[in-house]
Amino acid sequence: MRRLEEEIGLSRGAIFHHFRDKESLFLAVAEDDAVAMVDTVAQHGLVQVMRDLLDRASPTSPDGEEPEVAGWLGTQLEVSRRLRTDPEFAKRWAARADAIAAATRDRLARQRDTGSVRSDVDLAVLAQFLELAYDGLVLHLAMGRPLDDLGRVLDLVETAVRRRGA
Amino acid sequence: MRRLEEEIGLSRGAIFHHFRDKESLFLAVAEDDAVAMVDTVAQHGLVQVMRDLLDRASPTSPDGEEPEVAGWLGTQLEVSRRLRTDPEFAKRWAARADAIAAATRDRLARQRDTGSVRSDVDLAVLAQFLELAYDGLVLHLAMGRPLDDLGRVLDLVETAVRRRGA
């Protein structure tokens, strides 16, 4: 809450004039996050979303801020908790996850048309593979595990969906 | 606690005679889980651990029990919460994660010697790639997302670390 007050220049009272409670505020932030992610996936692909995430988590990053990443990861974990306890939230969240999945499939389809994505595996499987890697990165960062060679791991993820030699 | 009483045939009182509190009991269960996982990784590899996990989560599985998987996933999420709030726990958990990572690297090294694992990417990167997929599967199941084609996604994960044509 303190960081949000500083960030948007509104007092706690003004913020809660717009949002009924912390839960509603949290949901609005999570929804914004998902909309921005669909845009980035459509333009640059899910691997780029992962690379951006890794950059922000890196301590050597110019705008690398531990608190921001920790806050974002807290959001992800709060999402996973609410999914198990709030059926209405779970339904809305599934729609958002489906939108990200659809954007991933669309982009893969366009890239297959230009010959850069492999054609021997179903697009649905390739898209789920990228989503699995994304989820893995989220949990890895949430656990605070070292970043090690994750950049090269993402290269491997990207190569695995590419046509050989493309 | 109720399921544990049934499972091991000891009363709540008897269980807490051995474990100081719920936290200690939780830690013992989590430690057991990690030791068993290191064994399976050494014998059959991390991809097999993932396939077993997917089988247990599948509703068509003969011994597929929603509560068991939910309990196990609850453990994983509890781990991630404690990692952020309990530095001593984080240290012990990191040692366990390192043991799993080491078992994964060892197995990859043996398989590279027999020619079945690709040699153009560092073993450390291949191992981290498999761990990323494992973490992704854990979060996917924890979120209660549909299983879809995850079996074929795991085939793709396995192929990505194999030597081409092997």
Image (spheres, coloured by chain):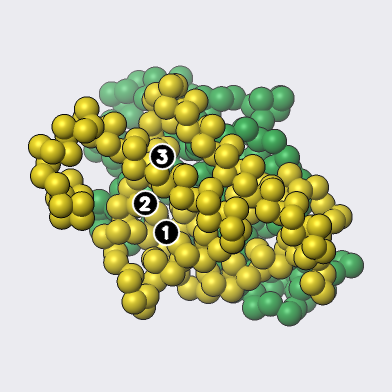
Chain colours: A yellow, B green
Closer to the N terminus: mark 2 or mark 1? 2
Residue under disc 3 on the same chain as residue under disc 1: yes
Q: Nearer the viewer, residue A101 or A125?
A: A101
Chain for mark 1? Answer: A
Quickly name the residue at label 1. A141
Question: In this rendering, would A113 be left or right of A1?
Answer: right
In percent of width and height, residue B70 lies at 49, 30
Dot 3 alpha-carbon crowd within 10 angstroms: few under 14, some 14 to 19, many 20 or more: some
Rendered view: A145 above or below A132 = below
In percent of width and height, residue B20 lies at 24, 38
Quickly name the residue at label 2. A73
Find out whether the residues at labels 2 and 1 contact each other: C-beta distance under 8 Å. Answer: yes
Q: Residue furthest right?
A: B165
Closer to the N terminus: mark 2 or mark 3? 3
Three-letter amino acid code at disc 3? Glu
Three-letter amino acid code at disc 2? Leu
Three-letter amino acid code at disc 1? Leu
* Residue under the image location 18 percent in, 46 percent down: A1
Cα distance in 3D space between marks 2 and 1: 8 Å
- Can residue B11 be seen here? The reply is yes
Quickly name the residue at label 3. A31
Rendered view: B145 above or below B129 = above
Chain for mark 3? Answer: A
* Residue under the image location 38 percent in, 34 percent down: A81
Question: In this rendering, would B137 be left or right of A116?
Answer: left
